[in-house]
Image (cartoon, rainbow, N blue to C red):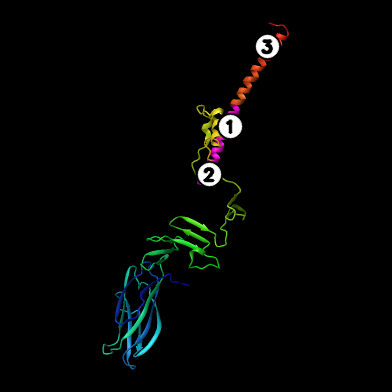
Amino acid sequence: MSGFSDYVFIKDGEFTVPANFTFTAPSIATGRRAILSFRVKSTGGEEEDNLGLAVFINDRNTPVHSQTLKGHRTYDSTIQEALENHVLEQGNNVIRFQKSNPVIVQGPIRLSDVVVWYGADTFLALNSTDGKQRIRFDANIADMRMGGNGQGADLVLFPASGNIGSLSQATFRVRADTGDLIMGGNGTSGDVELKSANGTATIRLIAATGEVSATTFIAGGIPLNVPDYVWDSNYVPMPLAELRAYTAREKRLPGMPSAAEITRKGLNLSQFQMQLLEKIEELTRYLFAQQETIQAQEARLDALDSQLKQLAQGQP
């Protein structure tokens, strides 16, 4: 079974034979067949006249279509003619409509709506009214492209109850100019759900509640300021007296965002996790320092206790 994946409208208005038209079939595949279609509107002259019509494409001497029409009639019928291989060429083609009988027969032949359907190489292109290609389907690479040539491409989906003429009633929209993906609205919650191979939902974005649900989270491919530097010998945590004064004044730990800042800018979770890790590691260093102080004090107390025992026993 064969199909035709592209077409060119050669003439959409009425015209009188003889007439020549130039048209372009840019995507026609070499050796593909095509179909010529046009409408016979009417003929003039006398009823007993036999008007011969012949149609030629390019410089071929053999017509691709010929027929005899009766004079002084209204036909308004569509003619379709299968074209042989290699009749059409990539690029410009010329189609000629002319009379095939002697010039003594003077009745006019009126035609309209000339179209050629043909098999394209691999793609179907849709052009705007100004002739610019805006939508293209390429079967060779299973590719669909939209937009460009001065026009951003949007993909818009509507619910069954929506009005396709009103963008405000859409529930799914992809905007190429801004890179936005908009889902939901108009009574619909735009949730996103990703499933594993066995059908288990592993990630869910719930629009109604603003929740993000995932089985695990791995931050990779982005620069993270991991606070290994806290363990460097030249890193000095803030002295506790200064830390106490800072927290009393700012109501937060150093380097951590304030409530007002989070309200205004939001919260970068990956960065926030690294900030928390820094505070945990600093706290661990405080504990180590405290442990050293405690151990030193215990050693001093042990020494004092030994001296007291010696004094009690009358030893110098």
Residue that lies at the very extreme toward the bottom in this rendered image: 48
Identify the residue position indicated by label 3 in the image.
307
Range of magenta residues: 264-288
Closer-to-camera residue (148/63): 148
Asked if labels 1 and 3 touch by Cβ distance under 8 angstroms, the answer is no
Task: Compute the Cα span from label 3 to label 1.
Answer: 36 Å
Asked if labels 2 and 3 touch by Cβ distance under 8 angstroms, the answer is no
Is residue 268 inside the magenta stretch?
A: yes
- The disc labelled 1 sits on which kind of residue? Leu
Residue 8 appears in the rendering: yes
Residue 267 appears in the rendering: no
- Residue at disc 1, secondary structure: helix
Judge the density around disc 1: few (<14), some (14-19), many (≥20) Cα neighbours within 10 Å. Answer: few
Tell me which residue sits at (56%, 28%) in the image: 241
Judge the density around disc 3: few (<14), some (14-19), many (≥20) Cα neighbours within 10 Å. Answer: few
- The disc labelled 3 sits on which kind of residue? Gln
Q: Which mark is residue 283?
A: 1
- Residue at disc 3, secondary structure: helix
- Residue at disc 2, secondary structure: helix
Tell me: 102 left or right of 280: left
Task: Compute the Cα span from label 2 to label 1.
Answer: 24 Å
Closer-to-camera residue (240/285): 240
Q: Which mark is residue 11?
A: none
- Image coordinates of residue 316 in percent, x first then y, are 68, 5
Task: Compute the Cα span from label 3 to label 2.
Answer: 58 Å
Tell me which residue sits at (60%, 28%) in the image: 287
Magenta segment, principal secondary structure?
A: helix
- Image coordinates of residue 188 in percent, x first then y, are 57, 61
Q: Which mark is residue 262?
A: 2
| 126 w.r.t. 313: above or below | below
Judge the density around disc 2: few (<14), some (14-19), many (≥20) Cα neighbours within 10 Å. Answer: few
- Label 3 vs label 2, nearer the camera: 2
